[in-house]
Amino acid sequence: YRFDGDKQKAKEFFEHGLSEVFTRMKEIANPEYPITIYYAFKQTETETKNTDSPTVTASTGWETMLEGLITAGLTIVGTWPMRTELSNRTRGIGSNALSSSIVMVCRPRPETASFTTRRQFFTQLKRELPQALKNLQQGNIAPVDLAQASIGPGMAVFSRYVKILDADGSVMTVRNALEIINQTLDEYFAEQEGEFDSDTRWALTWFQQHQFNEAPYGEAETLSKARNNSVEGLVQGGILASKSGKVRLLKRTELPDQWDPSTDTRTSHWEMTQHLIHSLDKKGEIATATILSKLGSNKTIAKDLAYRLYDICDKKGWSKEAIAYNSLIIAWGEISHLSPDTQPQPQTQPKQGELFNQSQ
């Protein structure tokens, strides 16, 4: 209301105010200690620049905050998500609300900081961001928080330079950087699909197009040829239903309650992940931990698939389905802890030696 509904003026006012705050923080901070900033903002804007370009996504709140931070001459030297929101708060129940804030560790940008080009920035981002994302996933960060958590290490690359120049000589904006970071996140998930078996890659493509709805058999057959499998094999694998010229992915409510991956003759990463969610929903963490213990080296891939499926659901606006994958990752740490193959084995109590031989 202060700016008569002018969003641009409101944004400039907020950005200028943040810049003044960050500048003052930099001036009074002890140079021996870094500045830490806690921030969380999920809202994003998606736009298509032209008909030949893919859609690009950037977070409006992050853009404004980071613009103020960088204008103040600060650089991000470390980031990590921290759980700051209760899952049982009114906003968080049954929703994909953020459960974490991002802690950004900042220092004044060195006077020796240099310029770089858009291409060099992109190359550096491709080199550093995937490992940072892998570390976040290993820490079982909730999928709902991963997109904003990736902003931290991405902007750490951006903020270490005085300016980043585009090919036309113009200065890259924070918004452009956020778009590139989101594109790199999408590429990271797409590259992970190479880890999945052919049945799972088929299911992922089908899921993106039809979710759990029916579609013509012929469409499924065409896709199966590209994935080097068959519709009949997918049915036998326990992930697909085929009837009257229509096929669809099995819903979790249709999965058998008693499922043992060690005796299943055709197990896919898709089936593993869906059964883990089904078990968690119906039986709880202990029963799910038993299944997890039987997955062997496929545990990590099943978790990677849950992240990928959440990302797809989030972009499609399938919030109810997204909650299922988010819930699995949130519970992953406890499930792993309860898994029989991670429980400490009982140790034999050592027998104390005797000073004298009792037979003597």
Image: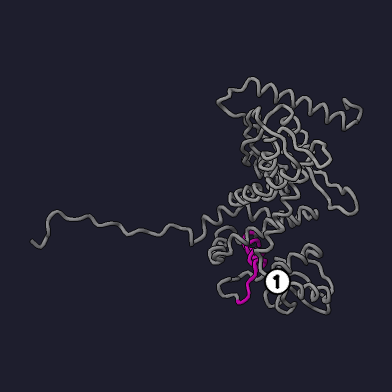
Structural crowding at the residue carrying mark 1, measured as other residues with C-alpha within 10 Å and reported as few (<14), some (14–19) or many (≥20): many
Q: Dot 1: what SS?
A: loop
Q: Which residue is mark 1?
A: 239
- Report the residue at 89% width, 26% height from top: 3
- Report the residue at 77% width, 24% height from top: 17
Q: Is residue 314 above or below residue 214?
A: above
Nearer to the camera, 124 or 238: 124
The percent position of residue 118, horizontal first and vertical second, equals 76, 43
Whether residue 234 can be seen here: yes
Report if residue 125 lies within the magenta region.
Answer: no
Nearer to the camera, 42 or 108: 108
Number of numbered markers: 1
Image quarter hosting the N terminus: top right
- Report the residue at 66% width, 23% height from top: 25
Q: Is residue 181 above or below residue 251?
A: above
What residue type is disc 1 on?
A: Ile
Q: Kindly indicate the quadrant of the structure image that contains residue 35.
A: top right
The percent position of residue 304, horizontal first and vertical second, equals 64, 58
The percent position of residue 311, horizontal first and vertical second, equals 73, 54
Q: Kindly indicate the quadrant of the structure image that contains residue 39.
A: top right
Q: Which residues are magenta?
A: 265-280
Examine the residues drawn in magenta and state their main secondary structure: helix
| Left or right: 219, with 127 as reference point | right
Q: Is residue 191 above or below residue 120?
A: below
| Left or right: 219, with 322 as reference point | right
The percent position of residue 321, horizontal first and vertical second, equals 74, 57
Image quarter hosting the C terminus: bottom left
- Report the residue at 79% width, 28% height from top: 14
Nearer to the camera, 235 or 286: 235
Whether residue 97 can be seen here: no
